[in-house]
């Protein structure tokens, strides 16, 4: 497994990579797509990873 497989994306505020370990909430949006909220380990903000 490479590091990208466990990554949720990057923080929209500081661009730090956010791993699945920082996942807080996973949900389904009204349009049927899924979304996540995670804590950024670098800036300690709760964000929707990009």
Image (tube, rainbow, N blue to C red):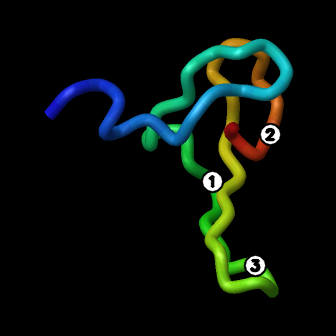
> Percent position (x, y) of residue 31?
77, 84
Point 71% across, 52% down: residue: 37
Viewer-nearest of discs 3 and 1: 3
Q: Are marks 1 and 2 in contact (CB under 8 Å)?
A: yes
Tell which circle, 3 or 1, labels the residue nearer the N-terminal end. 1
> Percent position (x, y) of residue 25?
65, 62
Tell which circle, 1 or 2, labels the residue nearer the N-terminal end. 1
**Position of 25 relative to 49 (above/below):** below
| Residue at mark 3 | 29
Point 81% across, 86% down: residue: 30
**Position of 2 relative to 36 (above/below):** above
**Label 2 crowd (10 A; few <14 / some 14-19 / many >=20):** some
> Percent position (x, y) of residue 18?
55, 29
23 with respect to 12 (left or right) = left
| Residue at mark 2 | 46
CA separation, marks 1 and 2?
8 Å
46 with respect to 1 (left or right) = right
CA separation, marks 3 and 1?
16 Å
**Dividing the image into 4 quarters, which one contains the C terminus?**
top right
**Position of 10 relative to 14 (above/below):** below
- Element type at marker 3? loop
- Element type at marker 2? strand
> Percent position (x, y) of residue 41?
63, 21
Tell me the quarter of the picture where residue 17 sits.
top right
Tell which circle, 3 or 2, labels the residue nearer the N-terminal end. 3
Along the line of sight, which residue is nearer the eye, 31 or 41? 31
| Residue at mark 1 | 24
- Element type at marker 1? strand
Tell me the quarter of the picture where residue 38 sits.
top right
**Label 1 crowd (10 A; few <14 / some 14-19 / many >=20):** few
**Position of 35 relative to 20 (above/below):** below
Viewer-nearest of discs 3 and 2: 3
């Amino acid at each position: 497994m490479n590091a990208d497989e466990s990554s949720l994306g990057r923080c929209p505020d500081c661009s730090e990579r956010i791993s699945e370990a920082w996942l807080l909430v996973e949900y389904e949006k009204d349009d049927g797509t899924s979304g996540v909220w995670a804590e950024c380990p670098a800036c300690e903000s709760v964000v929707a990873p990009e």
